[in-house]
Amino acid sequence: MDLLQLTVFREVMLAGSVSQAARNLHRSQPAISSTIARLETELGFCLFERKGKRLSPVPEAHYLLAEATEILDRMTSTQRNMQNLRNLESGSLRIVAMPGPSVFLLPWMISRITAAHAGIKATVLTRSSPQVHQLMSTQSYDLGIADLGVEFGVNTQLVRSEPFMSDCICAVPADDPLAQKPVLGPDDLDGMPLGALHADHHSHKELRKAFSAAGRHLDVRFETQYYLPLLTFVEDGLACAIIDTLSAESYLHYRGDDQKRVVFRPFRPGITLAFATLTPAHRPPSKLAESFMALWHEEVRRINQYWAAI
């Protein structure tokens, strides 16, 4: 049996005659009769009793009608689902990312592609950068975003990595006199309470080098594992903070119009951070994942251009 035979058989059953089935399927009556005859030959018994020009289905034909309807409906549903996948109207997206972008930025971006398509489901998991890499190596996530300023210690052959760079910026309380300066550096922040990532992170080490080279005193009052918590101390006027642009962008999305308590300024000399977009090495991306990755790369370029211009 093939799909054409099942389609013709079902139409004959529903139409009640070969002639009507032929008209419904836009085929000739001989073609319909020939298809039914081939189906009966393959099955080894007749599906209809012929009484003149009338066809009377045998009991087995009713069983086959139920089976054929289920198969053809399933095929129609599959075709529709595959079309939806092609048109990015359905599917699933699984992302694991470091906290900076996963808290606000990634959900905002996911909303952009899912708002008009209720058939798309998304999972966003927040993990440390080493954990992001480990989970991506299982091949069960579509996209990972991780900080390259840490040691992963896992098999990198399981993960494709596409790096992107970003410069650190300085977050300053809006009512601090430093907020009036266009650029900040060790001379401006000499002895000032600062917030930074933990001492083992690349950015913290580079910050110490910059202050040491300038002969200035670095006073790190607040250390956190991630950048976003540092902005609470800045909002409360307790410190300035050296953060990444992805966290700054997330902060702006989160605060919206109520973001007057913190201003951002370039930090010189520049401290460059390396991040990576991770994809599974042994599983090709879905159309939806490809579309989202393109959107992510476009957004990263926009963010870098925006913060480079401040």
Image (cartoon, grey):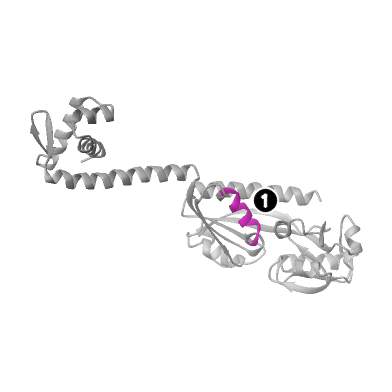
* Mark 1 Cα-neighbour bin, 10 Å: few <14, some 14–19, many ≥20: some
Q: Position of residue 41 (x, y in %)?
A: 12, 37
Between 270 and 33, which is closer to the camera in this rendering?
33
Q: Position of residue 57 (x, y in %)?
A: 13, 40
Residue 199 visible here = no
Q: Which residues are magenta?
A: 103-113
- Based on the picture, tell me whether residue 150 belongs to the magenta stretch: no
Between 277 and 18, which is closer to the camera in this rendering?
18
Q: Is residue 214 left or right of residue 224?
A: right
In the depicted structure, whether residue 40 falls above or below residue 279: above
**Residue at x-position 49% and y-position 42%:** 87
- Based on the picture, tell me whether residue 106 belongs to the magenta stretch: yes
Task: Identify the residue at the far bottom of this view.
Answer: 221
**Residue at x-position 69% and y-position 48%:** 301
In the depicted structure, whether residue 143 falls above or below residue 216: above
**The N terminus: image quadrant:** top left
The answer to which quarter of the image holds residue 180 is bottom right
- The residue type indicated by label 1 comes to Val
Helix, strand or loop at disc 1? helix
Q: Position of residue 14 (x, y in %)?
A: 23, 38
Between 209 and 60, which is closer to the camera in this rendering?
60
**Residue at x-position 86% and y-position 59%:** 184
Between 229 and 206, which is closer to the camera in this rendering?
229
Q: Which residue is mark 1?
A: 300
Counting every numbered tag in the picture gives: 1
Residue 129 visible here = yes
Q: Main secondary structure of the magenta part?
A: helix
**Residue at x-position 86% and y-position 65%:** 213
Q: Position of residue 9 (x, y in %)?
A: 21, 37
